[in-house]
Image (tube, rainbow, N blue to C red):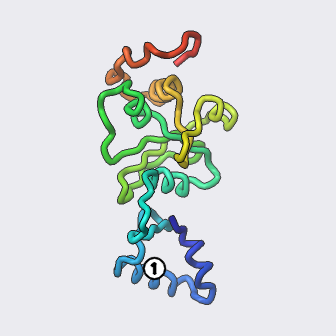
Amino acid sequence: MLARRDIEKLFPEEGAKAMDQSLKRMVGCGLLQRVARGLYVNPAASSKNRWIAEEIARALRPGSLSYVSLESMLSEYGVISQIPVNRMTLMTTGTSGLVETPCGLIEFTHTKRGAADIVKHTQAAKGRPLRIATKPTAVRDLLRVGRNANMMDLRGLEDEPQGEEP
């Protein structure tokens, strides 16, 4: 993943307008692929990053704490049978928004929870760039933001330890 500011460092003598044109040419001839505003990837890279959408999400909200939650994690945990196709749902301390990328839609939902609380109720997953919500946290997030809770299979919650509140 390359941010525009990183590419600009490679060409320090190039002005802003010239850089705009250079980036357009590089995208046009396939040297770079624009994945979001100011973010590019090398489409010819030999290694394909399984977590590229999470890398993009992290780059889109610099300085904010974001984690995968809501329908994305509930689907991974098997609490909902629907699999979000081409959509990743995140909670963030940054601004809410929906960003269309070549990797699919990235949906950011703002949370007022503090960093310590977020870290306590999420976990780092090996190789993933973003933290992921625990099952009870994903359920709690879904209910807090007023999303459709009817799609949850309550049997998928039965294996949770007693005393942890969803």
Residue at position x 56%, y 53% from top? 61
Q: Amino acid at mark 1?
A: Leu
Residue 5: quarter of image: bottom right
Would you call the spot at circle 1 few (<14 residues within 10 Å), some (14-19), or many (20 or more)?
many
Asked whether, in this view, residue 76 is left or right of residue 58, the answer is left
Residue visible at 44% across and 62% down in the picture: 47
Which one is in front, 120 or 128?
128
**Residue at point 37% right, 23% down?**
149
Q: Position of residue 38 (x, y in %)?
A: 50, 68
Residue under label 1, please give it. 23
Q: Is residue 100 above or below residue 165?
A: below
Does 50 sit above or below residue 70?
Answer: below
Looking at the image, the residue that sits furthest to the front is 46
Relative to 26, is 162 on the left or the right?
Answer: right
Q: What x and y, as percent, mark residue 162?
A: 55, 10
Residue pictured at 49% horizontal, 40% vertical: 68
**Residue, far right:** 116
Which residue, as the protein is rendered here, is positioned at the far bottom? 13
Give the camera-side residue of 114 and 96. 114
